[in-house]
Image: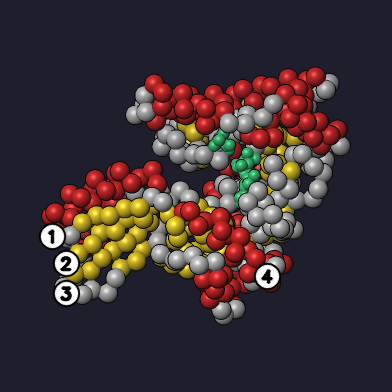
């Protein structure tokens, strides 16, 4: 007998028919003699709709109250799935995050899981129940409901798999696995049979939302093999694990992130210490900086350009404007019509010319590169957002056709 954790995303439980479909997948697994813990997200666009409802009333509402509201989405899907499983003649119990033992930090809307006390889940399994847990949520030490950040249900599933030493952790979604590019955007993207944790972590961080990056980080830390597969077809999915034969491939996937903005501070006096001070100001506001580019100084001045998440533009510009005056720099410019397109692949560590090939694809498509950043297993470029889909297709064609 095995312990299997199965996670179903919002589209997999979007309506009554889909909920019954999930119930049949879960009960089939249980009927084969396995213990099953199921993690579900909110139905369809429920979380987005709840955010809209909050914004209608108070866009500046406290994060505690936002969490209270957002956590409600998952409560609906766990109870509906339990009812569906009961209808098929099996015993199920639904549990909210706190009932399932999810202890988190108190950083509302982006809480981190500190511990999963799985004793209640174990008791329910001993009672022969199929256990259904609300993803994306937990409880802070102050006794308040928290949420883990968008896409956080993947992390909930991996955390349960780690806490319970599960034999298998399956992430069911609306595509058949991890592809060489988003299969909804690139028609001839192909499914990968395997991908390493490191590559998947880069991909997830660079915008491929098929897995949440923190779930991959946790899977790597606890060595939990993940299987990403479709809840709608029976096709085999993609295995995410430590070492993958895919490492032989030059690149494994192309990703796009449009949640990015570019900021430049121009005419900074070319003396030591100002970059340090500038980025310290941003970090004091908890603003995460990604690609950074500094021009070679001329006439005693230099420019620093960097990228941040789109929703932090106002905070960043406000904080930098005050700073610009204080140090006699010229001005702060920003552009939120940019996108980051990246290639990821362990193969590029040992092959020359991968970046050149990517840049050639962009040149062929007449797409201008604004910024470049690299690591051992990825190359990212910042380009005009309007060119992003064209860029992904051109790069994908260059490497995979
Ligand atoms: P869920 O609701 O199941 O959590 P998500 O919408 O969060 O599903 O993630 C699945 C989506 O990820 C797919 O529908 C697909 O459009 C997108 N995606 C982006 N990049 C990739 C990729 N490389 N491989 C597979 N899917 C991808
Ligand atoms: N329902 C949450 C969201 O939409 C969590 C998840 O889907 O993983 O972000
Ligand atoms: Mg998701």
Element under disc 2: strand
Check if mark 3's residue and mark 2's residue have beta carbons within 8 Å: no
Residue 29: image location, x then y, percent: 81, 37
Check if mark 4's residue and mark 1's residue have beta carbons within 8 Å: no
> What is the quadrant of the C terminus in the image?
bottom right
Check if mark 2's residue and mark 1's residue have beta carbons within 8 Å: yes
Please name the residue that numbered disc 2 is placed on: 269
Confirm whether residue 221 shows in the render: no
Please name the residue that numbered disc 3 is placed on: 299
For discs 1 and 3, the disc positioned in front in the rendered view: 3
- Who is closer to the viewer here, 134 or 264? 264
Which comes before the other along the chain, label 4 or label 3? 4
- Who is closer to the viewer here, 278 or 328? 328
Image quadrant assignment for residue 82: top right
Mark 2 vs ligand 1: CB below 8 Å: no
Please name the residue that numbered disc 4 is placed on: 249
Q: In the image, what residue occupies the spot 49% across and 33% down?
A: 147
- Who is closer to the viewer here, 40 or 116? 40
Please name the residue that numbered disc 1 is placed on: 328
| Lateral position of residue 191 relative to residue 310, left or right | right
């Amino acid at each position: 007998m095995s312990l299997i954790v199965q996670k179903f995303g919002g589209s997999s439980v979007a309506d009554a028919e889909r909920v019954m479909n999930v119930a049949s997948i879960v009960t089939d697994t249980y009927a084969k003699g396995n213990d099953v813990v199921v993690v579900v997200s909110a139905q369809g666009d429920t979380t987005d709709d709840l955010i809209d409802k909050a914004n209608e009333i108070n866009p500046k509402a406290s994060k505690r109250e936002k969490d209270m509201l957002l956590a409600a989405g998952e409560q609906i899907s766990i109870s509906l799935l339990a009812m569906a499983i009961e209808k098929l003649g099996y015993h199920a119990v639904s549990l909210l995050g706190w009932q399932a033992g999810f202890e988190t930090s108190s950083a509302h809307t982006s809480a981190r899981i500190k511990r999963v006390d799985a004793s209640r889940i174990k008791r329910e399994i001993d009672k022969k129940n199929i256990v259904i847990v609300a993803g994306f949520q937990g409880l802070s030490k102050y006794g308040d409901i928290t949420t883990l950040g968008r896409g956080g249900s993947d992390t909930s599933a991996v955390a349960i798999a780690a806490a319970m030493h599960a034999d298998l952790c399956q992430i069911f979604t609306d595509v058949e696995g991890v592809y060489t590019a988003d299969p909804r955007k690139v028609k001839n993207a192909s499914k990968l049979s395997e991908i390493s944790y490191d590559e998947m972590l880069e991909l997830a961080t660079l915008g491929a939302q098929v897995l949440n990056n923190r779930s991959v980080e946790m899977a790597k830390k606890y060595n939990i093999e993940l299987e990403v597969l479709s809840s709608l077809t029976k096709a085999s999915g993609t295995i995410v694990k430590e070492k993958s034969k895919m490492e032989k491939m030059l690149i494994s996937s192309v990703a796009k992130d449009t949640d990015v903005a570019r900021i430049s501070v121009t005419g900074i006096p070319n003396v030591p210490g100002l970059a340090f001070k500038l980025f310290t100001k941003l970090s004091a506001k908890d603003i995460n900086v990604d690609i950074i580019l500094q021009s070679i100084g001329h006439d005693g001045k230099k420019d620093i350009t960097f990228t941040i998440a789109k929703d932090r533009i106002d905070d960043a510009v406000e904080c930098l404007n005050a700073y610009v005056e204080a140090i006699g720099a010229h001005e702060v410019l920003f552009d939120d019509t940019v996108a980051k397109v990246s290639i990821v692949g362990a193969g590029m560590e040992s092959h020359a010319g991968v970046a050149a090939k990517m840049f050639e694809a962009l040149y062929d498509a007449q797409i201008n590169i604004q910024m470049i950043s690299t690591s051992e297993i990825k190359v990212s470029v910042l380009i005009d957002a309007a060119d992003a889909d064209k860029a992904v297709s051109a790069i994908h064609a260059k490497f995979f056709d």
